[in-house]
């Protein structure tokens, strides 16, 4: 469960950094947490977003930064994918470099902002004595398999789905 949470959280952080990077180039919205990297108007938005996402992901998943051609199947790391993406952009080198700088600034600012938020720390919650108004964890529920089947049909004309349960 925690691994899924960490992946979701880091993807959220990378999206925030990308947003702030692009928003710094053409400001239209309020920046997250006051993150406002300096940017020139001709900076590449694509390069800025890519740099921000890359830097946040490499921060949280450093083992996935480098490629491993000897792995089965061969593993293409974040650094190689990032470099390939930047090379595919049809913008001037100056524009791409300016965009990368903005993205790196946004990622760094976000990582500094969230560094000590405790979200990845140890859970120190102590359960209270059960009683009214006190949270009580429930035991895991075990669902047994039955011979029931679920049959669904999709009506493309109405864009509706109907399902029926039948005992078998």
Image: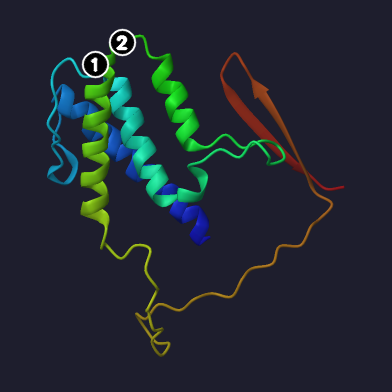
Percent x, y of residue 136 = 45, 79
Q: Secondary structure at mark 2?
A: loop
Most distant residue in the right direction: 168
- Disc sitting over residue 68 in the figure: none
**For mark 2, does the 10 Å Cα neighbourhood hold few (<14), some (14 to 19), or many (20 or more) residues?**
some
Residue situated in front as seen by the camera: 63 or 147:
63
Which residue is drawn at the image coordinates 70% and 27% (left, top)? 153
Which residue is drawn at the image coordinates 49% and 76% (left, top)? 137
- Residue 127, above or below 111: below
Most distant residue in the front direction: 70
Residue situated in front as seen by the camera: 66 or 25:
66
User: Where is mark 1, residue-wise?
Assistant: 95
User: Where is mark 2, residue-wise?
Assistant: 91
Percent x, y of residue 164 = 72, 38
Classify residue 160 as left or right of residue 130: right
Which residue is drawn at the image coordinates 38% and 14% (left, top)? 89
**For mark 1, does the 10 Å Cα neighbourhood hold few (<14), some (14 to 19), or many (20 or more) residues?**
many
């Amino acid at each position: 469960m925690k691994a899924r949470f960490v992946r979701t959280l880091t993807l959220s952080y990378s999206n925030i950094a990308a947003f702030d990077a692009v928003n710094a180039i053409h400001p239209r919205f309020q920046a997250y947490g006051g993150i406002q990297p300096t940017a020139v108007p001709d900076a590449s938005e694509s390069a800025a977003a890519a740099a921000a996402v890359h830097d946040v992901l490499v921060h949280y998943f450093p083992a996935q930064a480098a490629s491993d051609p000897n792995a089965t199947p061969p593993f293409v790391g974040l650094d190689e994918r990032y470099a390939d993406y930047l090379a595919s952009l049809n913008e001037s080198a100056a524009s791409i470099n300016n965009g990368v700088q903005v993205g790196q600034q946004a990622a760094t600012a976000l990582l500094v902002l969230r560094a000590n938020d405790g979200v990845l720390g140890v859970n120190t919650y102590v359960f209270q004595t059960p009683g009214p108004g006190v949270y009580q964890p429930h035991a895991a529920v075990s669902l047994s398999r039955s011979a029931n089947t679920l049959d669904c049909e999709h009506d493309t004309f109405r864009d509706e789905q109907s399902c029926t349960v039948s005992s078998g």
